[in-house]
Amino acid sequence: MRYVCSGIFMSSIYASSGVNSWNYHYDVGDPMEEASGFGYVPGSASYTTINAAIVPVMQGYWTSFIKHLDPDPGRYLGSPE
């Protein structure tokens, strides 16, 4: 809520003013974090374990978006458009 709601709110303000904006929401579950009920477990590193395979895919989308304002041209090989 802290980041998602404020991000959506800011994007809606930009949109209503005719300014281009992008709102990114990445919500990947991690069993240990979900089981804790806190959303984050100090010391956990799911990006190196259970979610490791998604890291290069997300890096590809982000890098492509930064370079081209489009996540697809430079996406990770084999990842969906």
Image: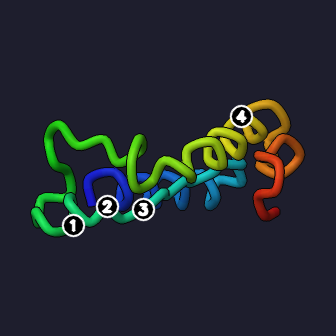
Inter-mark Cα distance, 4 to 1: 28 Å
Mark 2 nearby-residue class (10 Å; few <14, some 14–19, many ≥20): some
Mark found first going from the N terminus, 4 or 3: 3
Contact flag, marks 4 and 2 (Cβ < 8 Å): no
**Can you say whether 59 is above or below 36 in the image?**
above
Inter-mark Cα distance, 4 to 2: 24 Å
The numbered disc on residue 34 is 1
Q: Residue at the spot x=66%, y=48% of the render?
A: 57
Inter-mark Cα distance, 2 to 3: 7 Å
Residue under label 3, please give it.
28
- For the N terminus, the quadrant is bottom left
Mark found first going from the N terminus, 4 or 1: 1
Contact flag, marks 2 and 3 (Cβ < 8 Å): yes
Contact flag, marks 4 and 3 (Cβ < 8 Å): no
Mark 3 nearby-residue class (10 Å; few <14, some 14–19, many ≥20): few
- For the C terminus, the quadrant is bottom right
The amino acid marked with disc number 3 is Val
Residue under label 4, please give it.
63
The numbered disc on residue 30 is 2
- x, y (%) of residue 19? 69, 48
**Can you say whether 44 is above or below 5 in the image?**
above
Q: Residue at the spot x=26%, y=53% of the render?
A: 2
Contact flag, marks 1 and 2 (Cβ < 8 Å): yes
Q: Is residue 80 left or right of residue 24?
A: right
Q: Indicate which label's residue lies in the foreground, 4 or 2.
A: 2
Q: Indicate which label's residue lies in the foreground, 4 or 1.
A: 1
Q: Is residue 34 left or right of residue 58?
A: left
Q: Nearer the viewer, residue 78 or 17?
A: 78
Disc 1 secondary structure class: helix
Disc 3 secondary structure class: loop
Inter-mark Cα distance, 4 to 3: 19 Å
The amino acid marked with disc number 2 is Asp
